[in-house]
């Protein structure tokens, strides 16, 4: 997920929790993390990590659809014996046992760099449903229940029109670059940067709304680090061979982009050098992802006055005028970043700063431009992720349209997916999971009565959202037409930035969703103490109203238990039931917790991500605690169901739950993608999302008759919850 800010919301899959994003608008699990900028990103939120890979050239809307997954293909079974490896020993490597057959039979599709059995198959089905809706909207056969169907149709049709990308989008880009070229002084710079931010272009830092971590009833401003083109600060500051190679490729990529935008070879090289120098300076002042997981390290209520003091050379009043919000209360998440920016503004001359801003515009727009830009952008993305082919244009357009108008197209989408019955069953399952957590609280050895009591209170205050929002978002003020894709993306970003900044100073909107209904993901938001499960994920193999309890619990039950445990992971536990960051546990209990969390961090540190790269136990700690807790809660919930029909000749209901759980994470990924995620993703690779929680589960050994001391039933287990 990506998420409500620094650390506030955490999602089930994909890189989100450490991304400096304001809201959990999270890409599907199949999407690469913040590798390169994409239009969907500029459309949906000014700072969110990139979503989908760059696209290919396909015909416009009116021609027959491109091949995708066969629409008639049956969804994967919740428990699929053919996905298993009968020769593998479940006590030695449960992931291989549950997924060995699947991994062999499911190579990574050429237009992906990672392929996960659950997330990606569901994502592909949703994508087809969305395309159908969007094509009908584009053809004027609109759904009367969606008042914004015309906007959806116009957005999608313009996106599919490749000729317009070559001409109209390029014209939009040239106009934007001309405004950068016209900058004369610092006042102009601050004003233009504000305008760039509200239209979805990254640069220097980010600014948006956030609930005050220490008073969750207040919505204030958030000034945060940002402005990088590579996936993480480590790419600029680490000095190993792989990072040096990546920087060289990035420079080459920037050179080629400048050339495409009209620069000579020699000028383009100089400009690319300037970009790398400026971004490296920003990276050096940026906090690491691991540090950013500490909510106290990213909380500095300095307000406007304090922000100005950190970077007095920047004309803040022009900036705030440009974003049309005179914000005073501000969390300056990383004060040193703004001190660094101040030094940079003094060191670099305006021409270099303009070059940097030009590249931010070009890279951010690349996917919405013509073939040459798209392909150049893909080549760099390919280097980072190992993806073989560019994704078909319609897939990129579906993602961009969903990012821009997700709660418009979602009105039609949800009718085809989760029904009232499905919603009722899902809510019932959540209640079961909550009850299991409540009961478990009573038996957690390291807690005292006081902490137990307040934790139960937090649990009872937890708010759940299932399927889609009670009140749909309105898009009245978003102006979409069929002129230019890039202009539409900028308009969608402007709408979103205004919607976001307008929250400052107003009461918290508890109805607001951070994911679109079609998203295959879920999140927990600590500031609101809420769990959110979009309709997009509540499908087979995660969930089906027709599926038996063991497999529903191994899939969706695991997801629910995972999100619930986030409320009590190493970061989430620091927020009370009202979403306030404070010390609300006794110090002894907090210390006992930290000791157990350290056990988990150490355990995952041992796991290999790819080659010589290990999983980062501290980066993935919250997710791993959530996985371990989620599995335990799903099993405990199954046990409250009493005797049930076996339903499967080979496996007991408990075994079915474990296998269904394992099969959620069956996955193939390129070595490049694994390497990228080891740095950027707060989630562990599929193999370790299975074998980690399995080997920490106190019941698993009995259920699969694994002797103590086997790999999956070690004597020493890390149990937090
Ligand atoms: Zn999570």
Image: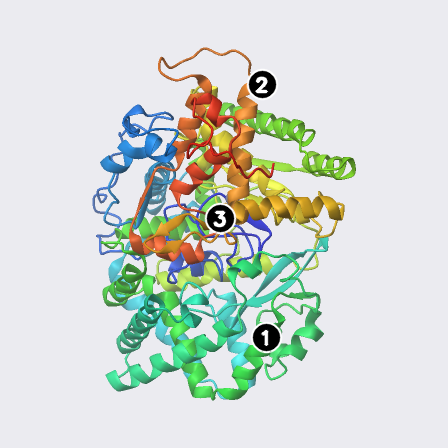
Q: Are marks 3 and 1 in contact (CB under 8 Å)?
A: no
Q: Earlier in the sequence, mark 3 or mark 1?
A: 3
Q: Is mark 2 within 8 Å of ligand 1?
A: no
Q: Earlier in the sequence, mark 2 or mark 1?
A: 1
Q: Image check: 95 left or right of 720? A: left
Disc number for residue 17? none
Task: Give the image quarter of residue 675.
Answer: bottom left
Find disc 2 in the rendering and name its residue: 640
Residue lying at 51% horizontally and 33% vertically, measured from the top left: 715
Q: Earlier in the sequence, mark 2 or mark 3?
A: 3
| Image location of residue 545, percent across then percent down | 46, 22
Front one among 93 and 501: 93
Front one among 175 and 673: 673
Q: SS for tag 1?
A: helix
Q: Is mark 3 within 8 Å of ligand 1?
A: yes
| Image location of residue 549, percent across then percent down | 48, 20
Front one among 94 and 81: 94
| Image location of residue 330, percent across then percent down | 67, 66
Find disc 3 in the rendering and name its residue: 1
CA distance for labels 3 and 1: 27 Å
584 to 49, vertically: above or below: above
Q: Is mark 1 within 8 Å of ligand 1?
A: no
Q: Image check: 537 left or right of 460? A: left
Find disc 1 in the rendering and name its residue: 338
Front one among 710 and 33: 710
């Amino acid at each position: 997920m990506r998420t409500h800010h620094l650390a506030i919301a955490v999602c089930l899959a994909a890189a989100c929790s450490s991304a400096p994003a304001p809201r959990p608008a999270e890409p599907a699990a199949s999407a690469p993390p913040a590798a390169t900028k994409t239009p969907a990103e500029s459309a949906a939120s000014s700072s969110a990590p990139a979503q989908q890979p760059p696209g290919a050239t396909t015909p416009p809307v009116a021609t027959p659809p491109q091949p995708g997954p066969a629409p008639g293909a049956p969804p994967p079974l919740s428990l699929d014996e053919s996905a298993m490896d009968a020769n593998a020993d479940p006590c030695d490597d449960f992931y291989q046992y549950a997924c060995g057959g699947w991994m062999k039979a499911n190579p990574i599709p050429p237009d992906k760099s990672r392929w996960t059995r659950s997330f990606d198959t569901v994502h592909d089905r949703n994508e087809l449903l969305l395309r159908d809706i969007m094509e009908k909207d584009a053809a004027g056969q609109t759904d009367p229940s969606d008042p914004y169907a015309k906007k959806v149709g116009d957005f999608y049709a313009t996106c599919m029109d490749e000729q317009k990308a070559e001409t109209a989008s390029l014209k939009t880009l040239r106009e934007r670059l001309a405004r950068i070229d016209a900058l004369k002084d610092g006042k102009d710079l601050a004003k233009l940067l504000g305008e760039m931010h509200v239209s979805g272009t990254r640069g220097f830092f980010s600014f948006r709304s956030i609930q005050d971590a220490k008073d969750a009833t207040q919505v204030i401003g958030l000034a945060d680090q940002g402005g990088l083109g590579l996936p993480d600060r480590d790419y600029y500051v680490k000095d190993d061979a792989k990072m040096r190679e990546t920087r060289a490729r990035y420079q080459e990529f920037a050179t080629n982009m400048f050339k495409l935008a009209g620069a000579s070879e020699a000028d383009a090289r100089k400009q690319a050098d300037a970009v790398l120098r400026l971004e490296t300076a920003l990276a050096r002042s940026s906090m690491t992802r691991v540090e950013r997981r500490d909510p106290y390290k990213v909380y500095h209520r300095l307000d406007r006055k304090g922000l100005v003091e950190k970077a007095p050379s920047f004309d803040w009043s022009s900036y705030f005028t440009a974003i049309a919000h005179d914000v005073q209360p501000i969390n300056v998440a990383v004060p040193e970043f703004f001190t660094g920016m101040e030094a940079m503004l003094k060191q670099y001359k305006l021409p270099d700063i303009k070059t940097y801003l030009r590249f931010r515009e070009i890279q951010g727009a690349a996917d919405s431009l013509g073939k040459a830009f798209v392909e150049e952008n893909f080549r760099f993305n390919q280097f980072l992720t190992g993806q073989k082919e560019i994704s078909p244009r319609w897939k990129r357009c579906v993602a961009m349209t969903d990012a821009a108008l997700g709660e418009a197209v979602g009105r039609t989408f949800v009718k085809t997916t989760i029904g009232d019955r499905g919603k009722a069953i899902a809510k019932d399952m959540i209640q079961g999971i909550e009850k299991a957590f409540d009961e478990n609280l009573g038996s957690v050895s390291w807690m005292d009565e006081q902490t137990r009591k307040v934790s139960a209170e937090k649990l009872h205050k937890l708010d759940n959202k299932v399927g889609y929002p009670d009140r749909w978002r309105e898009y009245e003020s978003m102006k979409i037409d069929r002129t230019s894709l890039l202009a539409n993306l900028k308009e969608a970003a402007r709408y979103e930035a205004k919607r976001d900044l307008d929250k400052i100073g107003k009461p918290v909107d508890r109805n607001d969703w951070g994911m679109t209904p079609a998203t295959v993901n879920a999140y927990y938001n600590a500031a609101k103490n809420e769990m959110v499960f979009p309709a997009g994920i509540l499908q087979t193999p995660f969930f089906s109203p027709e599926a038996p309890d063991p497999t529903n619990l191994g899939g969706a039950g695991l997801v629910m238990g995972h999100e619930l445990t986030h409320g009590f992971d190493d970061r989430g536990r620091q927020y009370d039931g009202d979403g306030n960051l404070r010390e609300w546990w006794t110090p002894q209990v907090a210390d006992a917790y930290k000791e157990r969390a350290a056990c988990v961090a150490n355990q995952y540190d041992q796991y290999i991500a790819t080659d010589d790269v290990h999983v980062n136990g501290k980066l993935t700690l919250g997710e791993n605690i959530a996985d371990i807790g989620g599995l335990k809660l799903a099993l405990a919930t199954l046990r409250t169901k009493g005797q049930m029909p076996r339903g499967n000749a080979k496996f007991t209901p408990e075994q079915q739950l474990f296998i269904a759980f394992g099969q959620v994470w069956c996955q193939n990924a390129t070595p490049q993608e694994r390497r990228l995620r080891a740095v950027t993703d707060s989630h562990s690779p599929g193999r370790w999302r299975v074998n980690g929680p399995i080997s920490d589960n106190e019941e698993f050994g009995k259920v699969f008759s694994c002797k103590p001391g086997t790999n999956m039933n070690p004597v020493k287990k890390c149990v937090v919850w």
